[in-house]
C-alpha cells in the first residue's frame, strides 16, 4: 500500500504553543500515558516511539492545536459537522440486513467500491496494530479468474491417498460442469480481509479481521452493495490450507475472512424476529 506510515516508527507530535489552552485534555486521554506536560505546561511526548498512534490526543484537543504525523486539525473533518445516523436508523439497519445470495449481472461501481475500501481502513484494531490487508476481486472478470484458479487448484490437489472432503469435491465438480456456485454464490465481487499476524504489535488479528468485515458489510450496504459472508473459504483454510495459499498467495496461518458482494437480484420485504433465539443474561449485584 502506498503512503503507509510505519506504525512503530516514532510519532511526529507537535503542539502550537500559541493555540494550546494547556487544559491537559490530551494528556488525560492518552491510554498509554506517553504524553506529559513540559516545564511550560505544554503537552509533550518524551518517547514518541512508545506512542500507538491512536490519535486520541489529536481528536480530543478542543482547539485543534496538535499536528500529528504532519496532519493538522484543518486537514480533517470536525465531528460536529458530520451527520450521524440516529439510534432508530441503526436499529433498523440491524433488523433489516440480510445475507444476499442472488446477485445481478452488473458489476459494482469501482469508484463507490474504492470509497468504501478506503473508509474501511478506519476500522479499529487491537493496540492500534493496523496490519490489515484488503484483497479485493472487484468485478465479474476478476471473480471468474479467482473461481477458475480455485477450481483448478482443487482439481490438481493431491495429498497422498487422502481424498478431498465431500463438501468440497462434489460441489466443485458440479460447478465445473456449469452447475450452481454454492461457494461464491454468483457474486460479482469478493473481498478478503486478512491480518499479518507476524507484524509487530499485532495481538488480535482474527478479531481485527472480523470487525473490518462487519464494517464492510455496513458500508457496502449503505452504498447499494449487497453482501454475504463467505465461511466456505475459512473451511478451506482450516482443512486444506495449502489450497488457499496457492490461490490467494496468503500464508496458511494468516487470519482472514471473506465477504461476497455485488448488486442484489432479490428484495426482502420484511424483517425477521430473532430476539427469542439469543440469551440475554444480566448479572445484577444480588445474583
Ligand atoms: C461468519 C459467517 C459465515 C457465513 N458463511 C456463509 C457461507 O459460506 N455461505 C453462505 O451462503 N452464507 C454464509 N453466511 C450467511 C449465514 O448463513 C446467514 O447470516 C444466516 O443464515 C442468517 O441470515 P441473514 O444473514 O440473512 O440474517 C455466513 C454468515 C456468517 C456470519
Image (cartoon, rainbow, N blue to C red):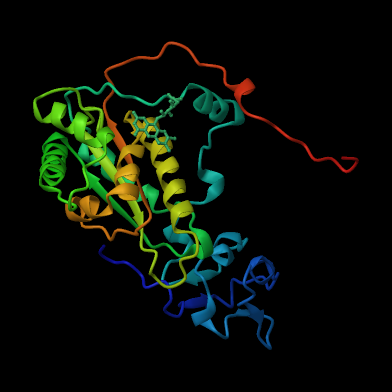
The x and y percentages for residue 104 are: 21, 22
At x 63%, y 67%, the residue is 31
At x 35%, y 49%, the residue is 238
Left or right: 189 with respect to 56? Answer: left
> Which one is in front, 70 or 287?
287
The x and y percentages for residue 198 are: 38, 69
The x and y percentages for residue 103 are: 24, 23
Whether residue 224 is situated above or below residue 197 in the rendered picture: above
Q: In which quarter of the image is residue 23?
A: bottom right
- Given the current orientation, which residue lies at the most extreme right position? 286
Q: In which quarter of the image is residue 245?
A: bottom left
Q: In which quarter of the image is the C terminus?
A: top right
Q: In which quarter of the image is the N terminus?
A: bottom left
- Given the current orientation, which residue lies at the most extreme top position? 269
- Given the current orientation, which residue lies at the most extreme front position? 161
> Which one is in front, 69 or 2?
2
> Which one is in front, 266 or 84?
266
Count of all numbered marks drawn on residues in the image? 0
Report ligand 1 position as a quadrant. Answer: top left
Left or right: 85 with respect to 25? Answer: left
The x and y percentages for residue 30 are: 63, 69
Whether residue 25 is situated above or below residue 219 in the rendered picture: below
Whether residue 185 is situated above or below residue 232 in the rendered picture: above
At x 34%, y 58%, the residue is 254
Left or right: 248 with respect to 275? Answer: left
Whether residue 216 is situated above or below residue 44 in the rendered picture: above
Amino acid at each position: 500500500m502506498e503512503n503507509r506510515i510505519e506504525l512503530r516508527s516514532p510519532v511526529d507530535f507537535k503542539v502550537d504553543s500559541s493555540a494550546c489552552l494547556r487544559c491537559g485534555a490530551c494528556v488525560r486521554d492518552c491510554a498509554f500515558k506517553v504524553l506529559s506536560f513540559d516545564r511550560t505546561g505544554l503537552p509533550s511526548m518524551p518517547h514518541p516511539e512508545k506512542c500507538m498512534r491512536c490519535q486520541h490526543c489529536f481528536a480530543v484537543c478542543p482547539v485543534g492545536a496538535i499536528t500529528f504525523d504532519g496532519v493538522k486539525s484543518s486537514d480533517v473533518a470536525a465531528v460536529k459537522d458530520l451527520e450521524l445516523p440516529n439510534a432508530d436508523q441503526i436499529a433498523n439497519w440491524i433488523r433489516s440486513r440480510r445475507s444476499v445470495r442472488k446477485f445481478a449481472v452488473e458489476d459494482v461501481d469501482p469508484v463507490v467500491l474504492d470509497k468504501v475500501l478506503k473508509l474501511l481502513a478506519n476500522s479499529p484494531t487491537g493496540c492500534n496494530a493496523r496490519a490489515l490487508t484488503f484483497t479485493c476481486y472487484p468485478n465479474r472478470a476478476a471473480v471468474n479468474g479467482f473461481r477458475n484458479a480455485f477450481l483448478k487448484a482443487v482439481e490438481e490437489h493431491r495429498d497422498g491417498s487422502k481424498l478431498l472432503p465431500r463438501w468440497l469435491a462434489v460441489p466443485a465438480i458440479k460447478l465445473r460442469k456449469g452447475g450452481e456456485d454454492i461457494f461464491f454464490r454468483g457474486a460479482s465481487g469478493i473481498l478478503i480481509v486478512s491480518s499479518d499476524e507476524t507484524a509487530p504489535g499485532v495481538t488480535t488479528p482474527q478479531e481485527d479481521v472480523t470487525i473490518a468485515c462487519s464494517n464492510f458489510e455496513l458500508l457496502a450496504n449503505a452504498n447499494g452493495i449487497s453482501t454475504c459472508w463467505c465461511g466456505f473459504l475459512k473451511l478451506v483454510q482450516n482443512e486444506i490450507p495449502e489450497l488457499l495459499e496457492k490461490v490467494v498467495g496468503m500464508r496458511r496461518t494468516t487470519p482472514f475472512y471473506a465477504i461476497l458482494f455485488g448488486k442484489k437480484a432479490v428484495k426482502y420485504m420484511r424483517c425477521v424476529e430473532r430476539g427469542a433465539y439469543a440469551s440475554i443474561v444480566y448479572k445484577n449485584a444480588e445474583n
